Image: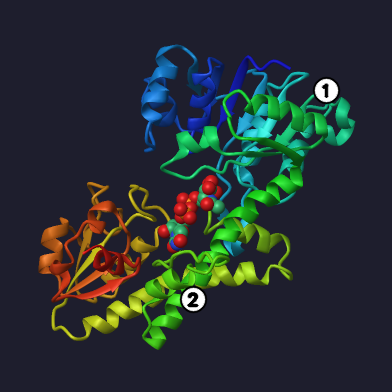
């Protein structure tokens, strides 16, 4: 099967780099998005999201004529669906974006086409997507109706790239490909081999769906273990960072790092898809979510207790993004903590976030966006929320007369370095 024209539906953090990766291999790529601004920006050869190296790739792809964006799907040989799968009330997965995307694609499908779901999805979503498309196209056969002989092939191939390293990981990471039938999987594998250097391993769609959820839940459970240790160590007056460093000297122990909580749109969301599918069995996975979601409140409590020592405390909060050296503030525990400190009027809060030029809505009029050196020198309390590079370079002497609440273990690294 030859894939000359590839359509990527959803031009966000995953879809746009994927579209650019195909275009860089000289495939004709049609990007589809409902956001007019995204479509216009891409067609100018520019990007609407921040990811290292992506701007150059997209610029080259558009100017050389391999990539263009549109708001409505057009015929293609393969369609990749990379739209968000958030959760709605009650931590239930919201498949409405997948439903809308697959229905819009169904309208332009022709015999022999491949449709791949890339969005992280609960188990059964790929079959559901195929059912939605089949409803609209009774003239075509789908794998659930015709098995290996279907007109349309359908597969799930979850993305696994780390924000900030997307371009490299897209090419190097192994891919798990779950076909609704063997031929569906083989067809998707051929498509991904266009740019993937890692192994492309075949399985069924349900296993591929569960595999992605498992990877992120594994990380969530392990971070919860570290976060729980940090609470126990606070209580017992033990340095958790030293404890973890020492424990990790054991050849079969590898504990992750505690933090102010777990942020981002993946690890804090995906485990709920497992809990929702199998609530009576997913006890540990649910509890890990609860432990990690609770961590910001513990940090706020510590700041509140420290602030009682001052009449008008000045609190410098270092970092707002959900992890180091990125500008993404969405679902960030650091933002949650700063917002709560400000709302409770605990003191004068100065937020330091070197990767943004303005505070997010809701914080902009309530706290100051400061510079590192100035904020630290004015502060009574310094709360380290993100381990950004400039913070890792901070001279620990600047902190000697401050109360430091260090959620990232930066201080223990600084003391080791100096
Ligand atoms: N965190 C800790 N302690 C740690 C590691 C992380 O507190 O030891 C926190 C971070 O500060 C951050 C959150 O966890 O708030 C998530 O960060 P992350 O770097 O672990 O992961 P993400 O959300 O940026 O990307 C994850 C990745 N999944 C895994 O590593 C299993 C990535 O490969 C996935 O593609 C991505 O989710 C996704 O899109 O699902």
Q: Tell me if mark 1 has few (under 14), some (14-19) or many (20+) residues whose alpha carbon lies within 10 angstroms of its own.
A: few
First along the sequence among labels 1 and 2? 1
Q: Which mark is residue 214?
A: none
Residue at numbered disc 1: 139
SS category of the residue bearing label 1: loop
Question: For the residues marked 1 and 2, what is the alpha-carbon distance in whole angstroms?
Answer: 55 Å
Which residue lies at the image location 13% right of the left edge and 83% below the top edge?
311
Among all residues in the image, which is located at the extreme top? 64
**Beta carbon of the mark 1 residue lies under 8 A of ligand 1:** no
Where residue 191 sits, quadrant-wise, is top right
Observer able to see residue 333: yes
Place of residue 403 in the rendered image (x, y in percent of width and height, measured from the top left) = 21, 77
Q: Tell me if mark 2 has few (under 14), some (14-19) or many (20+) residues whose alpha carbon lies within 10 angstroms of its own.
A: some
Place of residue 15 in the rendered image (x, y in percent of width and height, measured from the top left) = 52, 33
Which residue lies at the image location 52% right of the left edge and 59% below the top edge?
268
Left or right: 79 in relation to 143: left
Where residue 276 sits, quadrant-wise, is bottom right
Observer able to see residue 14: no
Residue at numbered disc 2: 228
Left or right: 9 in relation to 350: right
Between circles 1 and 2, the one closer to the viewer is 2
Place of residue 414 in the rendered image (x, y in percent of width and height, measured from the top left) = 25, 64
In this rendering, the answer to whether 199 lies above or below 160 is above
Residue closer to the observer: 14 or 68: 14
Where residue 361 sits, quadrant-wise, is bottom left
> How many numbered circles does the render carry?
2
Residue closer to the observer: 123 or 35: 123
Quadrant for the C terminus, please: bottom left
Quadrant for the N terminus, please: top right
In this rendering, the answer to whether 342 lies above or below 168 is below
Place of residue 359 in the rendered image (x, y in percent of width and height, measured from the top left) = 26, 53
């Amino acid at each position: 099967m030859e894939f000359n024209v590839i359509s990527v539906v959803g031009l966000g953090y995953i879809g746009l780099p994927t579209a650019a990766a195909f275009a860089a291999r000289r495939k004709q790529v049609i990007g589809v998005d409902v956001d007019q601004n995204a479509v216009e920006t891409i067609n100018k050869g520019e990007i609407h999201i921040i990811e290292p190296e992506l701007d150059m790739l997209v610029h080259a792809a558009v100017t050389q004529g391999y990539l263009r964006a549109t708001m409505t799907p057009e015929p293609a040989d393969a369609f990749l669906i990379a739209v968000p799968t958030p959760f709605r009330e009650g931590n239930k997965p919201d498949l409405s974006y997948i439903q809308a995307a697959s229905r819009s694609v169904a309208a332009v499908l022709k015999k022999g086409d491949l449709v791949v779901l890339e969005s992280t999805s609960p188990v059964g979503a790929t079959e559901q997507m195929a059912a939605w498309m089949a409803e609209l196209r009774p003239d075509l056969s789908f794998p659930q109706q015709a098995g290996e002989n279907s007109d349309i092939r359908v597969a799930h191939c979850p993305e696994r790239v780390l924000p900030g390293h997307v371009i490299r990981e897209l090419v190097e990471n192994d891919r798990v490909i779950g076909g609704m039938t063997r031929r569906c999987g083989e067809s998707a594998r051929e498509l991904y081999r266009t740019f993937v250097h890692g192994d492309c391993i075949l399985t069924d769609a349900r296993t591929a769906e569960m595999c992605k959820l498992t990877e992120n839940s594994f990380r969530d459970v392990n971070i919860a273990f570290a976060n729980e240790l940090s609470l126990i160590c606070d209580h017992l007056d033990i340095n958790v960072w030293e404890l973890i460093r020492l424990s990790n000297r054991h050849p079969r122990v590898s504990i992750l790092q505690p933090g102010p909580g777990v942020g981002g749109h993946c690890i804090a969301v995906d485990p709920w898809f497992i809990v929702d599918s199998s609530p009576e069995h997913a006890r540990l996975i649910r509890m890990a979510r609860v432990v990690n979601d609770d961590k910001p409140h513990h940090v706020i409590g510590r700041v509140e207790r420290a602030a009682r020592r001052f009449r008008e405390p000045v609190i410098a909060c270092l970092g707002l993004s959900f992890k180091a050296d990125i500008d993404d503030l969405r679902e960030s525990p650091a933002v949650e903590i700063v917002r709560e400190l400000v709302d409770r009027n605990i003191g004068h809060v100065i937020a330091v976030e070197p990767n943004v030029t303005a505070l997010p809505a809701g914080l902009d009029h309530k706290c100051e966006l400061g510079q590192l050196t100035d904020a630290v020198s004015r502060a009574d309390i310094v709360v380290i929320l993100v381990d950004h590079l400039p913070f890792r370079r901070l001279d620990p002497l600047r902190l000697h007369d401050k109360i430091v609440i260090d959620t990232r273990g930066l201080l223990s690294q600084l003391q080791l370095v100096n």
